[in-house]
């Protein structure tokens, strides 16, 4: 796709804001069809599917926020002139064509598209069948905004493919693909990694951990745990595992207090064998695979550790490398934890629910990357570009 100037791109986004507001009722009505057809066997998936007035407001806010951000394309990264007088300029450049595969969430059809387009990328959207009606109307609105500004509908396009057709498309794409972002569970990610023939950027699962140090402020710990677990169970930044240092003062009492507080919020509390000696009525987990599991439910697993080092080792062994938090008043301990935990985002005395583009100040996000190349964490506008070298000479040859 050709390079567009910033004014044209912003005009498309301005049109989209107007169209989203105008078609608010139609968007919600289309979503109701999806909700009525959904069997609700997966509460987290159902929660992500819902589009209401608040969600439309968030879609509009996302488009507006990206419109107001600086254009990320063509920014100079480095500029140096060598002894041979070659001037070498490294600048940001679009990826080209991005394919995102995602389940449920119709708001991804807005956020992914607005980011990709502002960064001058073409985007192919492969949404889940559960959100078909919602995605169809949102694609239609994007096409209206593009055509109103003299641009091709090909910039933003839904792929209407079944699972087998998607597999074939990944193996033998009918058009060039430069980057694929699978946004969903481990099964989806493994499916894409198995069949893709181009670069894949992993938007990983959650399974986030929180460690309560013996130096923790207990009130902070409880508040953070409750928020991280119950604020939004369908979020990939929700909390699933809590590790508590056995040397915490009034240890048994505090463990029982935490259990009571969680159960007041209707959270099912699972325990390891050590915590099971204190919480004798709770289900004891003996299977190692549960430590790897992302719950996406009102469920949490509490375990006992004897040190910060043991907590770090467990987190690096079992977590999804998404987000991890330590609750402690010891800043040296916190820094050691944050340096050594292998996660995209590490927290000191704060909820993992802040691993989010909007909450972290980067605006709308395409996904949360747990990869180490080329970016880790929220994929915002400035992360949807690659780089390109411009080399200016005057007849130089290599000798």
Image (spheres, rainbow, N blue to C red):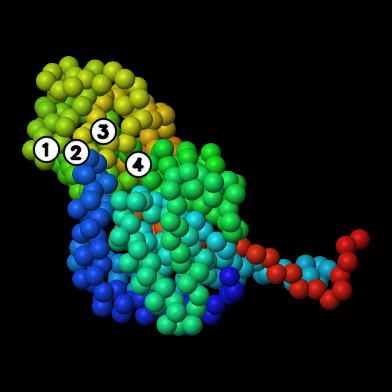
The residue wearing badge 1 is: 266
Question: Which one is closest to the eye, mark 3 or mark 1?
Answer: 1
Which residue appears at 74% of the width and 69% of the height? 391
**Disc sitting over residue 242 in the figure:** 3
- Circles 4 and 2, Cβ within 8 Å, touching? The answer is no
Position in image of residue 217 (x %, y %): 20, 40
**Disc sitting over residue 388 in the figure:** none
Which residue appears at 88% of the width and 62% of the height? 398
Which residue appears at 41% of the width and 38% of the height? 186
Q: Is residue 393 above or below residue 174?
A: below
Q: Is residue 96 visible?
A: yes
Q: Is residue 262 left or right of 367 when viewed as pictured? A: left
Give the Cα distance between marks 4 and 2: 14 Å
What is the quadrant of residue 287 in the picture?
Answer: top left
The residue wearing badge 2 is: 298
Q: Secondary structure at mark 2?
A: loop
Q: Secondary structure at mark 1?
A: loop
């Amino acid at each position: 796709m050709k390079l567009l100037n910033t004014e044209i791109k912003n005009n498309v986004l301005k049109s989209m804001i107007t169209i989203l507001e105008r078609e608010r009722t139609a968007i919600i009505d289309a979503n109701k069809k999806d909700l009525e057809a959904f069997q609700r066997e997966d509460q987290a998936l159902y929660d992500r599917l819902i589009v209401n007035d608040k969600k439309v407001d968030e879609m509009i806010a996302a488009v507006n926020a990206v419109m107001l951000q600086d254009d990320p394309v063509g920014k100079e990264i480095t500029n140096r002139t060598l002894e041979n007088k070659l001037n070498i300029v490294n600048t940001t450049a679009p990826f080209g064509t991005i394919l995102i595969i995602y389940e449920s969430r119709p708001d991804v059809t807005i956020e992914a598209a607005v980011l990709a387009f502002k960064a001058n990328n073409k985007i192919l959207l492969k949404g889940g069948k559960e959100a078909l009606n919602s995605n169809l109307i949102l694609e239609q609105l994007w096409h209206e905004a593009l055509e109103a500004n003299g641009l091709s509908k090909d910039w933003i396009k839904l792929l209407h493919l079944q699972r087998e057709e998607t597999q074939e498309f990944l193996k033998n794409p009918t058009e060039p693909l430069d980057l694929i972002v699978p946004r969903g569970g481990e099964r989806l990610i493994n499916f894409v990694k198995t069949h893709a023939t181009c670069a894949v950027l992993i938007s990983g699962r959650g399974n986030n951990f929180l460690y309560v140090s013996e130096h923790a402020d207990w009130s902070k710990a409880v508040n953070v745990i409750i928020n991280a677990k119950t604020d939004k169970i369908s979020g990939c930044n929700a909390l699933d595992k809590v590790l508590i240092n056995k040397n915490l003062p009034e240890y048994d009492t505090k463990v029982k207090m935490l259990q009571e507080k969680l159960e007041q919020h209707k959270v099912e509390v699972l325990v390891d064998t050590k915590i099971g000696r204190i919480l004798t009525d709770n289900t004891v987990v003996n299977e190692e695979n549960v430590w790897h599991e992302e719950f996406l439910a009102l469920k949490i697993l509490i375990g006992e550790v004897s040190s910060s080092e043991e907590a770090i080792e467990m987190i690096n062994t079992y977590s999804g490398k998404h987000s991890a938090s330590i609750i402690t008043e010891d800043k040296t301990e916190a820094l050691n934890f944050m340096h050594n935990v292998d996660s995209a985002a590490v927290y000191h005395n704060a909820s993992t629910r802040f691993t989010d583009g909007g909450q972290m100040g980067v605006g709308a996000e395409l996904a949360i990357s747990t990869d180490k190349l080329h970016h880790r964490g929220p994929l915002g506008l400035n992360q949807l570009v690659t780089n390109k070298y411009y080399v200016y000479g005057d007849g130089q040859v290599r000798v």
